[in-house]
Image (spheres, helix red, strand yellow):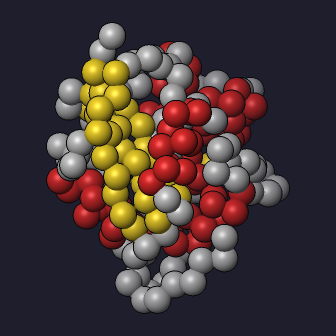
Amino acid sequence: MSRAYFSYLRTWLGFSLVSWQEDRLRAFILPQKSKEKALSIFQKKAGFSFCLRPQEKSPFPYLEEAIQNYFEGYPVSFSCPFYLDDLTPFTREVLKATALIPYGKTLTYGQLAEKIGNPRASRAVGRALGQNPLPLLIPCHRVTARYNWGGYSTYGLRFKILLLSIESRPDPGSSFTPFI
């Protein structure tokens, strides 16, 4: 059984959980009201078996600062190495293309399907995004339906709208009242 680690990051929205194995990120849980809720969501989403051990800090010191900056409305690019090995090749391809969507921009499921060379696979793209173990870091919230917001598995549509609202703020760092 392989060994993975996790730690919590505190943001103004609550506690996120970050998990890693060796030198690559394995999972990220968006902020929750408590550490227990973040761990519960992580355990439900984890589709792999490993020995999970808590750590005080992650080996990615820049990650906590980048996440704090993101939630304060500053444009951030997450350049951490990701562990996606246990996902299907199609899902990995979708997530790698999604990781390239710039801060504050969106694509539709159909546009993302075209980018990966499979223009008729918009529904499959949506299903693949639902497998994203690293939301925010791989910004699946930036993928929408053609005529509406689309979905946002595990976290719900309100969280997707919140993340897109953060990215469209004209004045980063100013006070912000979430409506979730």
Height in image: 164 above or below 139?
below
Q: Give percent across and percent down for residue 41.
A: 56, 42
Q: Is residue 41 above or below residue 169?
A: above
* Residue 140: x %, y % from top left: 56, 46
What residue appears at the point 36 percent right and 64 percent down from the top-left corner? 10
Quarter of the image for residue 99 reads top left
Picture residue at 63% right of the left edge, 35% below the top = 130
Most distant residue in the right direction:
147
Q: Is residue 96 left or right of residue 125?
A: left
In front here: 118 or 154? 154
Q: How many marks?
A: 0
Q: Where is the C terminus found, in terms of image quarters?
A: bottom right
Question: Is residue 150 at all visible to an observer of this figure?
Answer: yes
Residue 160, percent from left and from top: 63, 58
| Relative side of 17 to 93, left or right | left
Among the 4 quarters of the image, the one containing residue 40: top right
Q: Is residue 139 visible?
A: no
Give residue 25's position: percent from left, percent from top: 32, 36
Front one among 126 and 1: 1
Q: Residue furthest top?
A: 1
Residue at image location 66% in from the left, 76% down from the top: 179
User: Which quadrant, please, contains the N terminus?
Assistant: top left
Is the residue 119 above or below the residue 135 in the image?
above
Q: In the figure, 87 relative to 55: above or below?
A: above
